[in-house]
Image: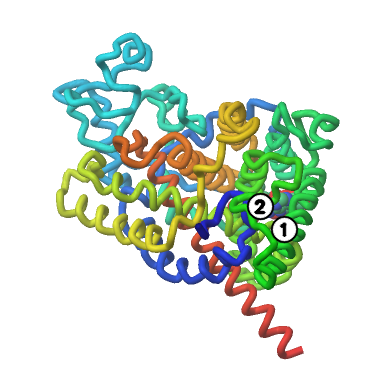
Amino acid sequence: TCTFSPNAIIDDGCVSYATLDRLNVKVKPAIDELVQTTDFFSHYRLNLFNKKCPFWNDEDGMCGNIACAVETLDNEEDIPEIWRAHELSKLEGPRAKHPGKQEQRQNPERPLQGELGEDVGESCVVEYDDECDDRDYCVWDDEGATSKGDYISLLRNPERFTGYGGQSAKQVWDAIYSENCFKKSSFPKSADLGVSHRPTEAAALDFKQVLDTAGRQAQLEQQRQSNPNIPFVANTGYEVDDECLEKRVFYRVVSGMHASISVHLCWDFLNQSTGEWQPNLDCYESRLHKFPDRISNLYFNYALVTRAIAKLGPYVLSPQYTFCTGDPLQDQETRDKIAAVTKHAASVPQIFDESVMFVNGEGPSLKEDFRNRFRNISRVMDCVGCDKCRLWGKIQTSGYGTALKILFEFNEGQKPPPLKRTELVALFNTYARLSSSVAAVGRFRAMIDMRDKMA
Ligand code: FAD
């Protein structure tokens, strides 16, 4: 009964920041181990350089700082075996080719796109053609057969301060938040502002109303605890507000992703006078500490992705997912490291209740809209004028897209959700990013406490 519903603010008496902080103490070493020591999860392949921004001319917005650059792996021998095997798997031969989408649709005997069929001799995590599946929340063209893409070591290209900013970054964030204007929005401001380029401040203002309502709700809850006669309706959260649940969740995911990126750039900041990479407390205070809603949205995302990973847990360990190392020992090691992460993610009660979404009111009709808007965000990532920011922006958008797909397109008890390798890698790396953001927020808070005590 005490789950962290998508309605809830974190400190609602059920799942608190402290609960998630405690969980993260266990999760962080396990997820770091997975993404830092396995070839499978520490490399990503995507088309980072050859795609134009589909929404505006972005030529003036390119970041020339060295910190914005991404180092790609250009020599075959630098690419881990498993990723080379991916290339091999595209060759026709004894391995079965996945049938194209069209063929699958026409032939009901064939499995749906992306699912492994009985007669498919595919030994790796599902690889299918580069078209989107109807259930995808992201544009999956990065690993497409038509554009080869680049191999990137994520360890050699950490997400951190790059100096990217100004009008280009602002335009991207504005465009991302503008996706929050659902067609049937009941937000008074959305209709006036239109779909494109809705100013971020306006979105923040709208959200402030939501938070104010949440504050009232929290007060009510406190009163209810001292007076049990006050009725409490589970999962109503901010329902007194006129904005529907799905739209609030959409906003929180985007704002939580933005907050996580800000935490990383403040934590791994370049002190330009000493040349040292170090935490920058002023950066944290001005971008995050003064905005509790942003921190709340970061924890919200942590809870959401934790739930997705816990839900995926039993399936990702099934023999249907393999890791293409060609070496059973390495395969088993990767599997064990995933198991350590999923075990912790599942060790808390279900902390995010996705079952209340897309069910009531206009909810069911919003699902496709929700998915399309998320896909648009993944397209907007091609407009980010800093290679490294684009790399991590794409990985994290894909990670959230995969988490949403697991939460909303897959019911427990079914066959494993068909996931591509890039989806799995993005999901676990996004979890790792969130985990280090949550840890960094704790350390920044401790720095503030210490400073205030000494003052
Ligand atoms: P911005 O962070 O650009 O924010 C713009 C406006 O959005 C703010 O004025 C505020 O009104 C609102 N806002 C800010 N945070 C939130 C939130 N959490 N929720 C709701 N509203 C909010 N820079 C790096 O140094 N390293 C990176 O890895 C990096 N990755 C990026 C990835 C993407 C996809 C993008 C678009 C930008 C990235 N940047 C990165 C740039 C960085 O995010 C900032 O845009 C830049 O540092 C300028 O910051 P700012 O203070 O002007 O505010």
The numbered mark, 2 or 1, whose residue comes first in the sequence reads 1
State if disc 1 and disc 2 touch (CB < 8 Å). yes
* Image side of residue 453 versus residue 81, left or right: right
The residue that appears at 28% across and 45% down in the rendered structure is 77
Residue 179: horizontal and vertical position, in percent? 68, 34
Looking at the rendering, which quadrant does residue 12 occupy?
Answer: bottom right
The residue that appears at 71% across and 27% down in the rendered structure is 183
Question: Looking at the rendered structure, which numbered label has been put on residue 237?
Answer: 2
Alpha carbon distance from label 2 to label 1: 7 Å
Residue 76: horizontal and vertical position, in percent? 30, 40
Question: Looking at the rendered structure, which numbered label has been put on residue 217?
Answer: 1
On screen, residue 304 above or below 142: below
* Image side of residue 295 versus residue 89, left or right: right
* Image side of residue 67 versus residue 348, left or right: right
User: Looking at numbered disc 2 in the image, what kind of residue is underneath it?
Assistant: Gly
Quadrant of the frame with the C terminus:
bottom right
The residue that appears at 32% across and 48% down in the rendered structure is 40
Q: Residue furthest bottom?
A: 454
Q: Can the viewer see residue 63?
A: no
